Amino acid sequence: MTQLMIPGMLSDGGPMSMLGGSWTLGEAFLLVSFWKPLILLATLCAWGWFVSNVYDKHAARFFLPREQWNVFHLCMATLAVVLAVMMPIHGELSFWIGWVVMVAVLAVDVVAYAVVANKDDRVPEAFHINASIFGKMGEKKDKKEKVDKKAVKVLLAIKGADGRAVPAPQAESPEAELRAVAESVYMKAIEGRASQVEIGPMGQQYGSTMLVDGLPIKGDIWEPAVAVRLMDFWKSVAKLDLADRRKKLSAMIDVELGQAKKKVKVTSQGVPSGMKLSLLFDPEGSVRRAADAVGFLPEQYEAMKELTSTTSGLVLVATPPDGGRTTLFYSVLSMHDAYTHTVQTVELEPQLTLEGAKHQAFDSSVEGTDFATLVRSMLRRDPNVLGVSDIPDAATAKNVATADFSRTRVYVAVRANTAMEALEGWTKAVGDAELATKHLQGVVAGRLLRKLCVNCRVPYAASPDMLKKLGVPEGKGVQLFKKGGQVLIKNKPEVCPVCSGGGYIGQEGIFEVLTFGDDERALAAESNFVGVKASLKKRQTPSLQQAAIRKAVEGSTSVEEVMRVTAPAPAAAKA
Ligand SMILES: [Zn+2]
């Protein structure tokens, strides 16, 4: 029954409603003659084939803003069709005028892409769009048929910022070469246990620098043209604006190498001589460490527990630039229970989310706000604990110093090499010693130390001189280790497979944990830093150097590394 009803409904309802209603120009046009719309359709199809088969592939190949271009093409096509259909419907001549207008609009679209694409640095001269592209189209197709569908073998499964997999490029194409370079950058960094790899200008060329256990290691060198495409490849995967070579942009992507899956933070930023791009591997994991695993000595850890058992007053958290600051900052904050207390942060760039804590990122693009004002408004909310990640200016320091410390514990991260340096720097930033130190509960300072590879470290008996220099009591049979790098395999020395010959693997922190009492606060209020130091020394608080020596005596690092890290001008001075 139903089957019989449908044709009836169609023949009655369909055309009837069309004849009964008022006609649109387009409908009228359709009824005028059947070959006219066919000509328009054929023209549109030819243009559409060209744009999708030549232009879209060209845009994809050279990382041009493909989506924006497709929207542009679509708008132009719509305009062309509308103009053609809007032409008066009677007479041959007006139809042909409409057709010419359509062709003209589509031609403008084709020329516009060619002009803009040819001006783009990313498109090599050999791939500029000119009249020869139409000639080449035929012959190219024959060749393409043979290599087509032969995608190059890729080692990495890369997922873009949009969660979609980046397809493997066609074999023997420029993208295949580029992909190979991009993959080798990643593989070398992973094999070298780098936490980060940075590509940036080096003199006339571009080079890569890997960060391994906090130390920079030079990598490959490229011509600027190759480096720019390489950086654009990673930027396009991260869906960052390729045209923006100034502002700091970043996004997360996923990269899989076999079973090893990593989150990678892609960041690009303009530098005076061009642009730099960094790939930061597993950024959350690298800063997320339990407070008892960052390297505090047992008595320091006890002092930290004491310090974080209250929620009032001010604590400074100090590290040299690039010296594990974020790790220390988050570890200290995580010692407060974020479920029984409100723990909040104000940060220029949050690196991870602490469970239960509220992170407030500072957005510099919002006009009329500054970091100092944001800090003040956060303090007004009276959280139990507030972490302030940076003191970019005197106004921020002032706003923190005048907080109501009876209601809030404030942790301020500062850049300093030692706890005393942090105290002096903070006092200077506030500009009033009494105000700066009135509520000071403590200063925690840290640095990073490389750990010896346990597989190849070389034991040696320390000389009495050395022990004296280190301040270690003699006659305890102290066993020290130095870096190895080689192991004996079947009595033949070979490169240690664990550390690849470097002798070190991983890092841990060394710290100073100074807790302030009334005596120290009174001395600090008079800017008597020598007095503060003397007062703390009486309590036998371990210094950074003493903490480092303890690590050497425990065998987790070498005396050389202790000297490198605790020398008066630390390695971080390079930054
Ligand atoms: Zn080793």
Image (cartoon, grey):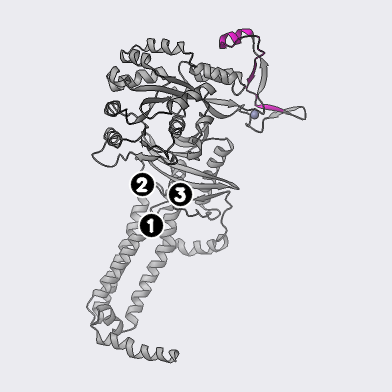
Q: Nearer the viewer, residue 334 or 510?
A: 334
- Mark 2, Cα crowd under 10 Å, few <14 / some 14-19 / many 20+, is few
Q: Position of residue 24 (x, y in %)?
A: 25, 79
Q: Which structural element holds mark 1?
A: helix
Q: Amino acid at mark 3?
A: Val
Q: In terms of sequence position, does the residue under pointer 3 or pointer 2 come before the other?
A: 3
Q: Amino acid at mark 1?
A: Glu
Q: Nearer the viewer, residue 335 or 483?
A: 335
Highlighted magenta segment, given as a residue range: 464-487
In the image, is 280 to the left or to the right of 86? Answer: right
Q: Is residue 465 magenta?
A: yes
The quadrant in which the C terminus is found is top left
Query: Which numbered disc covers residue 243?
Result: 2
Please tell me whether residue 227 is drawn above or below residue 73 in the rendered image: above
Q: Nearer the viewer, residue 33 or 383?
A: 383
Residue at 35% across / 16% down in the picture? 521
Q: Which structural element holds mark 3?
A: helix
Q: Position of residue 562 (x, y in %)?
A: 54, 19
The quadrant in which the N terminus is found is bottom left
Q: Which residue is mark 3?
A: 237
Please tell me whether residue 398 is drawn above or below residue 346 in the rendered image: above
Q: Amino acid at mark 2?
A: Ala
Asked whether residue 321 is in view, the answer is yes
Q: CA distance from mark 1 to mark 3?
A: 14 Å
- Which is more foreground, mark 3 or mark 2? 3
Q: Nearer the viewer, residue 445 or 184?
A: 445
Q: Quadrant of ligand 1?
A: top right
Q: Which residue is mark 1?
A: 67
Q: CA distance from mark 2 to mark 1?
A: 14 Å
Q: CA distance from mark 3 to mark 2?
A: 14 Å
Q: Position of residue 284 (x, y in %)?
A: 48, 39
